[in-house]
Amino acid sequence: MEIRRDSGARPLNLGLAGFGTVGRGLARILDENRDNLKLRSERPIRIRSILVRDPARARACPFPPQAKICADMDDLIRDPDIEVVVELMGGLEEAGRLIRGALEAGKHVVTANKALLAEEGGELFRLAARRGLHLGYEASVCGAIPIVQTLREGLSANRILTLFGILNGTSNYILSAMTSTGMSFDLALRQAQELGFAEADPSMDTEGLDAAHKLTLLIRLAWGVDYPFSLLPVEGISRTAPEDIGFAREFGYNIKLLGYARLEAENSRGRPRLEAGVFPTLVPRNYLLASVGDSYNAVRVEGNAAGSVFLHGRGAGSLPSGSAVAADILQIARGARPNNLGYVLPELPQAEILPPQETSASYYMRLTVLDRPGVLRDVAAVLAGNDISIAQAIQRGQKDVVPLVIMTHATTPVNAARALAQVKATGVLFADPVCYRVMPPSA
Ligand code: HSE
């Protein structure tokens, strides 16, 4: 096919904030895939300016030759030739100022900033809607995986029933490495940091906060409601031991850090009642999600019309995240109408959150106990007293202190927590109990 070299169309000028991993990936894609992009948009896409903290700092990767380098965000906001501000610097305060300033100046925005959109997104989306501007954020959830587009467009005619996601590559890398080699959490985390996909503060990854930011954005897209980030139950993987991975395997599961959301029903005003959270979860080993290894991300969405849809891919990295940023920019270059959230209302209502006593799950419990007569009886009595039925149990080891591992039938998180507190109070435990949810078999 002959590729037109110059359409004569007005270029789409970008003001790029940040020239780190994703910014460099974007620049490379715009350069190396230029011919492909020309087939998809009349308007050539150009990086006009790049905002960096220290323009004089020597860099291994040179700036694109035509770009102006600046250190003041007003240089992007005030430049009348810049139509799109691409925010790839991360953080809350400065990035928030830049995005607000750009929208107020009438510029479209594309960002990979999941923390900002999860915590302060409501206000920014309202501002973009008022001004009729794009606020693109495909790269902020699961890097290259087009899950924003999928929920906003491809599955938009569905009532979404459930959403399960491996939303954080670092924690998936850690759990996968622990599963395949038996290595410790600390060693696996060090490897993930060396590979460069952990957040600057890796506790964002390992404590589940990064996944929770992404889940907040996915809930908005799937159900058209704001689920306040601060109310989302979040638990990380930093206490997961190789022995939990081993016991889970014996029961037929892999442990994954899952972001989870489920529509229970609509309330009387038609607003969705949701159960959601981020939890280390035992996933049956024959499920696709259980075999998502390395630092890959995956999302499984179930729509009432489409059935189950599974997306898998690179959740971070220079080119994978750059690919998602470039796709958002391309939509703007093509003159698409802004459709940032996928809903008519510019202001989304707050989600109705299902109270924990109305939810249920089966649990994996690892109790470190003294191997003495009556311990199992006492633990079983506490569980029975909280209406928890034991499905399977393993106790293994020759020492005085041994792991007693129990898989329960479905119970409420309230009962599970109360039972564990009561077991602790009996004085039989030698370490804090470990308790993980099991992904429901029907899911
Ligand atoms: N630290 C994130 C992860 C990168 O490990 O998935 C992209 O959000």
Image (cartoon, rainbow, N blue to C red):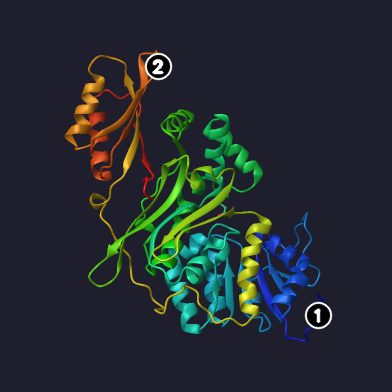
74 w.r.t. 7: above or below: above
* Lower sequence index among marks 1 and 2: 1
Q: Position of residue 181 (x, y in %)?
A: 58, 30
State the image coordinates of residue 435 (x, y, percent, origin top left). Answer: 35, 36
Q: Which residue is mark 2?
A: 397
Residue 275 on image: x %, y %: 33, 56
Q: Toward the viewer: 66 or 246?
A: 246
Residue placed most toward the observer, 244 or 79: 244
From the viewer's perspective, tell me whether residue 344 is left or right of residue 322: left
Please state if 234 lies on the left or on the right of 332 as rendered.
Answer: left
Q: Residue at x 53, y 43 (%)?
A: 291
- Asked whether the viewer can see residue 74, the reply is no
> Is 249 positioned to the left or the right of 79 in the image?
left
- Say which element carries label 2: loop
- Quadrant in which residue 437 is drawn: top left
Amino acid type assigned to the residue bearing label 1 in the image: Arg
Q: Report, in whole angstroms, how far the alpha carbon at label 1 lies from the one at label 2.
A: 72 Å
Q: Residue extending furthest left?
A: 385
Q: Which mark is residue 225?
A: none
Residue 4, numbered label: 1
Residue at the (66%, 69%) spot, across then down: 16
One can see residue 73 in this view: yes
